[in-house]
Image (spheres, helix red, strand yellow):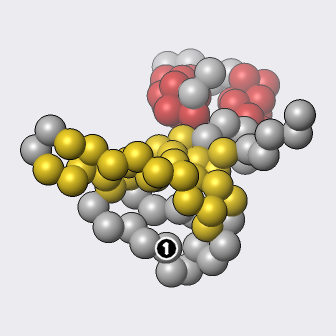
Amino acid sequence: MTRELLKQALDLILDPEGYYPDVVKNIRAELAKPEQAPAWHDAPNAPGVWLFAGRLMEKMYEWRAVRIQDVRNPDTTHGRWFGPIPEDKT
């Protein structure tokens, strides 16, 4: 279940015509957990390996894997970042 769907469900449950405290408590607990899967971002927000997708020309894209050590100063030039990608333990 995505975080956005949980947020939408929480808004519906908190509707003045009905209130379900156990469901609200469980959804809030789930939303408080850190995301487990990599996701798209405008800039890296955690150290690790990230996939960078940037547009070079109208129909040409650049894809590269980048290891980010310091999230305070990433190279975020005109693209999107997917990650952090978990290390392969095999």
Lateral position of residue 15 relative to residue 76, left or right = right
Give the percent coordinates (x, y) of residue 25: 76, 34
Residue 76 vertical placement versus 32 (above, below): below
In the rendered image, residue 29, in percent from the top left (x then y), is placed at: 77, 38
Residue flagged by tag 1: what amino acid is it?
Pro
Residue holding disc 1: 74
Q: Is residue 46 left or right of residue 5?
A: right
Q: Position of residue 73 (x, y in %)?
A: 51, 80
* Residue 41 in view of the camera: no
**In this view, 34 is above or below 77:** above
Residue sticking out furthest to the bottom = 73
Residue depicted at x 24% and y 50%: 55
Rendered-image quadrant of the C terminus: top right
**x 58%, y 48%: residue:** 83
Whether residue 66 is situated above or below residue 76 in the rendered picture: above
Classify mark 1: residues with Cα within 10 Å, few (<14), some (14-19) or many (20+). few
The reply to whether residue 79 is in sight is yes
Quadrant placement of the N terminus: top right
Q: Nearer the viewer, residue 78 or 62?
A: 62
Q: Position of residue 82 (x, y in %)?
A: 51, 46
